[in-house]
Image (tube, rainbow, N blue to C red):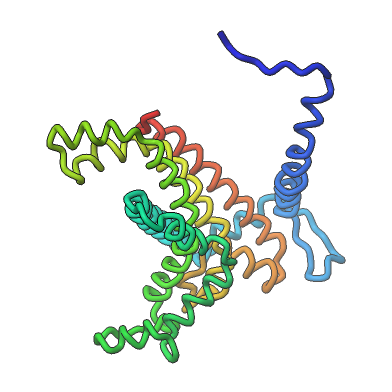
Amino acid sequence: MEKRAVFRSAWLPYALLAPQLAVTLLFFIWPAAQALFQSVLVEDAFGTRVEFVGIANFRALVADPHYAQSFLTTAVFALGVAALSLAAALALALLAHRVVRGAGVYRTFIIWPYAVAPAVAGVLWLFLFDPSVGTLAFALKKLGIRWNPLLDGSQAMLLVVLAAAWKQVSYNFVFFLAGLQAIPRALLEAAAIDGAGPAARLRRIVLPLLSPTIFFLLVVNMIYAFFDTFGVVDAVTQGGPARATEVLVFKVFQDGFKGQDFGAAAAQSVILMGIVIALTVAQFRYVERKVNY
C-alpha cells in the first residue's frame, strides 16, 4: 500500500515548497532565461546599442576553431578530474573504513580540503609546482624531469587536473565512506570464509554495492568539472599556455568579461548548459543500467 503524506491545511505544502521554488527560480531559471535571451542579441560594451541577430552568435561559434579546441580540452579535463578524484576518494575511503583508532581525526583531515575555495586550491598547487619557487617542481628537476607548466601545455593541463581533483576528493570521500559503512559486514565475512581475498571481495561485493554511489558521484563530478572549476583554471593557468587549458567555462568568461562580447558569451553558456543536460541524461539512460540498487 502506497504511503502518502496528508496535510491538515491545503496551503501548507505550498508554503514548505516556496523557499526552494524561489531559490530555483532566482538562481537557475531566471539566469538560464536571461542567457537564452542574450544569446540572440549583439550589444556593445556599454549596453547602449542592442541588435537582434537570431542564431548568428551560434554560427560564429561553430566556425571558430578555438571554440572547437575548447570542446576537446574540456573533455580531457573533465574525464581526468572525474577519474582521478573518484579513484583517490575511493582509495582513501577504503583505508579510512579500516582505521579503528583515531578514525575521527583521520576522516576530518581528509574532509577539510573541501572547505578551501577553488581559487585558493589553485594557488596552493601553483606554488607547489611553480618552476621557480615550487618545492615539488624542484624535486622534479632533481629527478631529471623538465617541468614548466608556463610553457608546456600538457604539463599545464596535468596541473589544473590535479588541483581540481584534489578539491573534489573530500566531497567524494564522504559519500564513499558512508556507502562502505552501509555494507553489511556479514557479507564480507562470509566471502572471506569462502576463501575470497581482499581484491575479490572488492570486485564482487564492495563495488557492486557501491554502484549507486559511484553513479551519483560520476554525474556530480562531471557537472563539477564543467561548471565549478573556473576558479582553479583562472588561478593556475588563465587558460594558457596557448589556450591549452581554456575549458568551456573559462572561455565564457574570457569572451564575455574580457572580450566584452556578451552575445557570444551567452551563446556559449547556452551550449554549455545543453551539453551538461545531455550528458546527465545519457548517464542516467545508459550508465544507470549497470547500477545495482
Of all residues, the one furthest to the right in this rendering is 48
**From the viewer's perspective, is residue 148 above or below residue 274?**
below
**Relative to residue 37, is residue 11 depicted above or below?**
above
Q: Quadrant of residue 18?
A: top right
Quarter of the image where the C terminus is located: top left
Residue sitting at 54 percent across and 62 percent down? 229
List the single residue furthest toward the left: 195
Residue drawn at 42 percent across, 75 percent down: 156
Please tell me which residue lies in front, 173 or 131: 173
User: Residue 71, relative to residue 179: is it above or below?
Assistant: below
Report if residue 146 is visible in the image: yes
Question: Residue 57's x, y, as percent?
Answer: 65, 57
**Residue that sits furthest to the bottom in the current view:** 132
Task: Please state if 180 lies on the left or on the right of 9 as rendered.
Answer: left
Q: Quadrant of the N terminus?
A: top right
Q: Nearer the viewer, residue 1 or 66?
A: 1
Could you say where residue 130 lies in the image, as x and y percent from the top left? 44, 84
* Residue found 31% across the figure and 83% down from its top: 140
Viewer-side residue, 94 vs 11: 94
Q: Answer with the quarter of the image where residue 115 lies.
A: bottom right
Viewer-proximal residue, 288 or 111? Answer: 111
How many marks the image carries: the answer is: 0
Q: Residue 276's spot in the image, x, y percent?
A: 54, 47
- Residue drawn at (52%, 62%) of the image: 112
* Residue at far front of view: 101
Give coordinates of residue 83: x percent, y percent.
Answer: 37, 55
Confirm whether residue 71 shows in the render.
no
